[in-house]
Image (cartoon, rainbow, N blue to C red):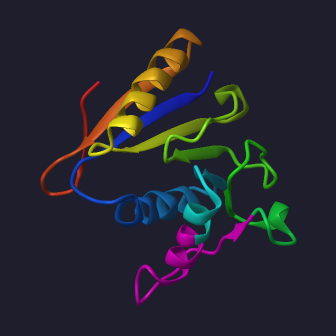
């Protein structure tokens, strides 16, 4: 069974919150996949991860480029796991593959988008019913993550 985490964005955007979580993932020696809901969002995150901070960047690639299987972080619009990631980030309400294939699956959703909130609630029920360990994290006003469930 996988650990399934739900990150409720209330104080920042995905672009602000995702890089720190990806940095921690890479520091742990894990490969990650980020599944977006559209090619436009994938491509926007691709650009952002190269430039999000002046003193750093996250080495990554997209599923449309050669050598996707060699990337430590792969941005995709599909359910494939081409880089053999152990952690999958699902954003924008994208339809995830089964969580069993991962050590950890992370759903990040915008608390100001009713459709994303509803999809997260639906996924919570699905993942819990499947027997996965599920936790819910919400941002504090200081943009820290606080475990709520």
Residue 125, image x, y percentages = 46, 15
Residue at 67%, 36% in the rendered image: 102
Residue 127, image x, y percentages = 54, 20
Residue at 61%, 45% in the rendered image: 88
Give the side of residue 119 with respect to residue 81, left or right.
Answer: left
Give the side of residue 16 with respect to residue 140, left or right.
Answer: right
Q: Residue furthest bottom?
A: 54
Give the side of residue 143 with respect to residue 62, left or right.
Answer: left
Residue 97, image x, y percentages = 69, 33
Residue 144, image x, y percentages = 23, 53
Quadrant placement of the C terminus: top left
- Queried whether the magenta region covers residue 48, the answer comes back as yes
Q: Compared with residue 61, is residue 52 higher up or lower down, i.e. above or below?
A: below
Q: Compared with residue 66, is residue 135 higher up or lower down, i.e. above or below?
A: above
Quadrant placement of the N terminus: top right
Q: Magenta segment, which residues?
A: 44-62
Q: Compared with residue 16, is residue 134 higher up or lower down, i.e. above or below?
A: above
Residue at 59%, 72% in the rendered image: 46
């Amino acid at each position: 069974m996988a650990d399934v985490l739900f990150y409720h964005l209330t104080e920042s955007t995905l672009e602000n919150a995702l890089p720190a979580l990806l940095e921690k993932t890479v520091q742990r020696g894990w490969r990650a996949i980020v599944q977006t809901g559209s090619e436009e969002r994938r491509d926007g995150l691709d650009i952002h991860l190269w430039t999000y901070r002046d003193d750093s960047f996250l080495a990554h690639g997209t599923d449309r480029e050669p050598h996707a299987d060699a990337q430590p972080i792969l941005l995709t619009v599909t359910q494939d796991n081409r880089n053999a990631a152990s952690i999958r980030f699902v954003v924008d309400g994208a339809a995830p593959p089964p969580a069993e294939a991962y050590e950890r699956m992370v759903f990040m959703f915008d608390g100001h988008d009713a459709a994303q909130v509803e999809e997260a609630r639906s996924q919570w029920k699905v993942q819990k019913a499947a027997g996965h360990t599920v936790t819910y994290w919400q941002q504090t006003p200081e943009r820290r993550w606080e475990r709520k469930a």
